[in-house]
Amino acid sequence: MTAVAAPARVGHPRIGIEGVRKTFTRRDGVEVRAIDDITLDVAPGEFVVLLGPSGCGKTTLLRAIAGLEPVQAGRIVLDGRTVEDPGGGVRVPPERRGLSMMFQSYALWPHLSVADNVAYPLTTRRVPRRERADRVGRALAAVGIGDLGEQFPGRLSGGQQQRVALARALVAGDGIVLFDEPLSNVDAKVRDQLRGEIRRLHAELGFTAVYVTHDQEEALTLATRLVVLREGRIAQSAPPAEVYLRPADTGVARFMGAGNELAGTVAADGVRTAVGPVVAREHALPADTRVLAFSRPEDWRFAPGAEVANRWRGRVETAVFLGPLSEYTVALEGGVVVRVRTLGTSGPEVGDAVGVGVPAEAVRLLEDPS
Ligand SMILES: Nc1ncnc2c1ncn2[C@@H]1O[C@H](COP(=O)(O)OP(=O)(O)OP(=O)(O)O)[C@@H](O)[C@H]1O
Ligand SMILES: [Mg+2]
């Protein structure tokens, strides 16, 4: 596989975000802190995914990096160059920040051919015609549409259009590529394919990426580091597996997928809950702290042996076949209902009395926010 374009410079740029704040004043006068003191360092070649619920500030942060949204405080440094510093009166315009963007809307020019659309960033930079054609050809081939250069965007499928947008984002060979939910408008199968392509191209070209999504699966697939935002602040910044397995708090834990939460207080023998003591492998919380003993449904199992520290009797209330796995709800003695996910379909039936349990190492204690 040939590279899309020669990198603009040796090595890849770093993105430094220091104490950035952005407040919007809505038309009704209410102030919204879209970015509330964010500091984030994106290392050269990192693929950082910004994840969080709608309205948490993902797009605003991305637009601030791009120079499309002036900030009120803080500093943004790209590749060692300060591009935004309201205190020092610095504001480098978007086209001079050395970055490319790919959006949810394809934003292709309908009157230009696919090749001319992809060539656009090179044209504005006055790259000579022959080099341009060469780089466009390689970019189109790299995203799997080498044969569509002469077509017009209006004749292409959504997935093909998004490949054009991807080729255009990569053709300039900018070391920084920003993505704002680029795959949310294409169907599930194409989305899967394009995710794979973006992963592959990143591995091959090593650009520095910041990618916005509110889709956990997408975030887990793409990120080398996951930054979970909440109300304009960073709730957790860690490799994807760590965010999933060791969420910083209940908000992150719930956002990252289904969980079982057993409320209780920390005691010497474990957490005292409505269904008895729950043992968690490691925690540093003092006695009497109110906590949620949090675990993922896939870490639960039926008919657990003595090696599983937390075991109960219960009754199966629902059983749902989800394809590769099945999900059950089980009412424990004491009334608490937990979710259990298992591979395959050979589990119990609705109404069955079952033993069910979760090992201590799969239980995390999170401070109870309520
Ligand atoms: N131009 C604007 N004027 C006023 N408020 C704004 C403006 N742009 C964004 N906001 C507000 O700032 C907050 C953050 O918005 P932002 O678009 O960054 O969220 P997001 O995380 O990208 O959400 P989504 O997942 O829905 O795209 C929201 O409360 C939003 O209403
Ligand atoms: Mg957004």
Image (cartoon, rainbow, N blue to C red):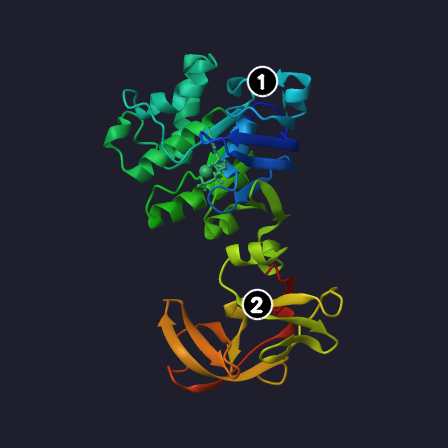
Please give left or right for residue 255 compared with residue 110 in the image.
right
Which sits earlier in the primary sequence, circle 1 or circle 2? 1
Are there few (<14), some (14-19), or many (20+) residues within 10 Å of tag 1? some
Please give left or right for residue 256 compared with residue 160 in the image.
right
Mark 1 and ligand 1: say if the CB distance to the nearest ligand atom is below 8 Å: no
Q: Which mark is residue 50?
A: none
* Residue type indicated by callout 1: Val
Image coords of residue 66 (percent x, y): 53, 26
Q: Quadrant of ligand 2?
A: top left
Name the residue carrying label 2. Answer: 295
Q: Considering depth in this image, is 137 or 24 the residue closer to the camera?
A: 24
Name the residue carrying label 1. Answer: 92
* Residue type indicated by callout 2: Ser
Are there few (<14), some (14-19), or many (20+) residues within 10 Å of tag 2? many
Image coords of residue 3 (percent x, y): 49, 32
Figure check: 213 above or below 256: above
Image coords of residue 354 (percent x, y): 47, 85
Q: Considering depth in this image, is 233 or 328 the residue closer to the camera?
A: 233
Please give left or right for residue 357 compared with residue 315 in the image.
right
Figure check: 321 above or below 21: below
Figure check: 12 above or below 47: above
Image coords of residue 288 (percent x, y): 72, 70
Separation of marks 1 and 2 at Cα, in angstroms: 46 Å
Residue 267 image-quadrant placement: bottom right
Residue 340 visible in the displayed image: yes
Q: Considering depth in this image, is 129 or 168 the residue closer to the camera?
A: 168
User: Of all residues shown, which one is farthest toward the left?
Assistant: 155
Task: Locate the C terminus and report the quarter of the image it occupies.
Answer: bottom right
Residue at the image point whose x is 51% and y is 69% from the top: 298
Mark 2 and ligand 1: say if the CB distance to the nearest ligand atom is below 8 Å: no
Q: Secondary structure at mark 1?
A: loop
User: Of all residues shown, which one is farthest toward the front?
Assistant: 28
